[in-house]
């Protein structure tokens, strides 16, 4: 409780717009603060830990006016400003505009693993905040972040928390591998096997899905050894039930596509897909996503200088950073100075095995539903 109260208090202090009647004095102070910040940023080796209280106070005031901006993270990361941990935790728990993963990255730099762990396990944390924090952890793909999620999954938190941690690991390739390792090592608690199966069964990486299927029963009515599908022409000839198809859609497609404003925008919007694609093209979009990848939705793999990977769609790019969108709709920005390699993937980021997780009838129903999506 105390913890949450402290976080709320800090949130209030830090995020309250600085609109509180700014007198001439405050304007002077903030100009001076900015000057101090610019000066120490320019110094090649400034030891912040040994800085005078006057300087640290100026930096603290300056940071409190920056929100979760690039400048904010740059300063905190460069000078390892540990007293920003509480603020970073607020940013990570709120995760607005996908800043959560960056806040977590900074927290890891500050070695605040314990604070992150307590925010996850604190009974007073709201479920959705906790989930955002855990997803951000997975997105950083850093060993220390994955270790926290690992501890939650195999630990003795309530089932809802462990389930959320298991799902969160599905948010990144490194996270999926960490979850797979728990499964292979037989450390996965029994009550999480359905969640782990659903998470790993959705992996875009075939090797992960195959390995997972050796240890878990991947969910869905179509087992891995289901009979092969009849030719698409035969499937097209059948009449599906669009209402049932809508339920299939909600189960498998919602996390990556939007219809109108519902769902999560990772792949293209499917609002009018029934006008755009005839049934045979709808089938091939699901059965062979990599055969024709929609323009602007190509997958990229970025290798960072620290050896970690980021995989996703390029949401935007400037001279200094590239913003990568991953399933779940989270974006992850990477400084270009941290990049070692970028590779365009030949495979679609839409999993190629989704149809195997449903029965033949369910697939026909799903296509019937997609055909109804028109202007
Ligand atoms: C993990 C994320 C993910 C999931 C889950 C997913 N998709 Fe996709 N989908 C994508 C991406 C990314 C693309 C764009 C790349 C491509 O064309 O392959 C895409 C493309 C498509 C397209 C082509 C759209 C166009 O405008 O040409 C269709 C149709 C589609 N998906 C349907 C589905 C259906 C139906 C499901 C559920 C069974 C589903 N997707 C599940 C990520 C996903």
Image (cartoon, rainbow, N blue to C red):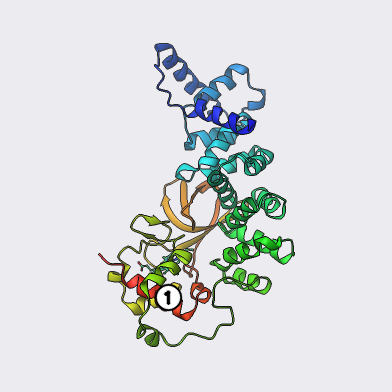
Q: Position of residue 266 (x, y in %)?
A: 43, 58
Q: Nearer the viewer, residue 254 or 108?
A: 254
Q: Residue at x 27, y 67 (%)?
A: 374
Above or below residue 126? Residue 186 is below
Q: Assign a secondary structure to mark 1.
A: helix
Could you tell me if residue 47 is visible in this image? Answer: no
| Mark 1, other Cα within 10 Å: few <14 / some 14–19 / many ≥20 | few
User: Which of the 4 quarters of the picture holds residue 123?
Assistant: top right
Q: Which residue is mark 1?
A: 291
Q: Position of residue 334 (x, y in %)?
A: 51, 48
Of residues 280 and 34, the one nearer the viewer is 280
Residue 291 in sight in this render? yes
Q: Horizontal and vertical percent for residue 109?
A: 63, 40
Quarter occupied by residue 283: bottom left
* Label 1 beta carbon less than 8 Å to ligand 1: no
What residue do we see at 61% from left, 67% from top? 197
Left or right of 353, for residue 260: left
Q: Quadrant of the C terminus?
A: bottom left
**Left or right: where does residue 362 sit relative to residue 50?**
left
Q: Residue at x 69, y 40 (%)?
A: 114
Q: Is residue 105 above or below residue 309?
A: above
Residue 199 falls in which quadrant of the image? bottom right
Image side of residue 241 versus residue 126, left or right: left
Q: Residue furthest left?
A: 375
Looking at the rendering, in which quadrant would you find the N terminus? top right
Picture quarter with ligand 1: bottom left
Query: 107 or 274: nearer the eye?
Result: 274
The residue depicted at 48 percent of the width and 65 percent of the height is 251
Percent coordinates x, y for residue 85 in the rendering = 61, 33
């Amino acid at each position: 409780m105390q913890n949450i109260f402290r976080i709320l208090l800090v949130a209030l202090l830090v995020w309250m717009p600085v609109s509180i009647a700014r007198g001439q004095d405050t304007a002077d102070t903030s100009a001076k603060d900015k000057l101090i910040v610019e000066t120490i940023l320019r110094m090649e080796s400034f030891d912040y830990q040994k800085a005078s209280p006057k300087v640290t106070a100026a930096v603290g005031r300056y940071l409190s006016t920056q929100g979760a901006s690039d400048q904010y993270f740059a300063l905190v990361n460069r000078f390892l400003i540990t007293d920003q941990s509480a603020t970073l935790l607020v940013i990570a728990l709120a995760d607005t505009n996908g800043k959560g993963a960056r806040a977590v990255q900074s927290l890891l730099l500050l070695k605040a693993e314990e604070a992150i762990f307590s925010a996850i396990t604190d009974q007073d944390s709201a479920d959705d905040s906790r989930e955002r924090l855990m997803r951000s952890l997975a997105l950083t793909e850093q060993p220390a972040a994955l270790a926290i999620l690992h501890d939650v999954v195999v630990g003795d938190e309530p089932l809802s928390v462990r389930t959320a941690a298991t799902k969160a690991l599905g948010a990144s390739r490194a996270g999926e591998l960490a979850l797979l390792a728990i499964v292979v090592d037989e450390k996965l608690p029994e009550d999480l096997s359905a969640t782990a199966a659903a998470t790993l069964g959705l992996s875009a990486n075939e090797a992960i899905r195959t390995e997972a299927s050796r240890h878990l029963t991947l969910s869905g009515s179509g087992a891995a050894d289901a009979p092969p599908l009849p030719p698409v022409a035969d499937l097209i000839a059948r009449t599906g039930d669009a209402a049932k198809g809508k339920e299939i859609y909600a189960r498998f497609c919602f996390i990556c596509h939007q219809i109108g404003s519902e769902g999560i925008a990772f792949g293209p919007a499917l609002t009018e897909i029934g006008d755009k694609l005839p049934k045979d093209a709808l089938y091939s979009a699901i059965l062979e996503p990599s055969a024709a990848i929609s323009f602007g939705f190509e997958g990229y793999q970025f290798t960072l200088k620290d050896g970690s990977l980021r995989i996703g769609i390029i949401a935007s790019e400037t001279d200094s950073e590239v913003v990568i969108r991953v399933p779940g709709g989270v974006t992850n920005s990477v400084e270009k100075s941290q990049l070692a390699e970028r590779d365009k993937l030949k495979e679609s980021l839409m999993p190629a095995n989704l149809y195997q997780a449903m029965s033949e009838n369910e697939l026909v129903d799903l296509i019937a539903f997609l055909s109804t999506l028109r202007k």
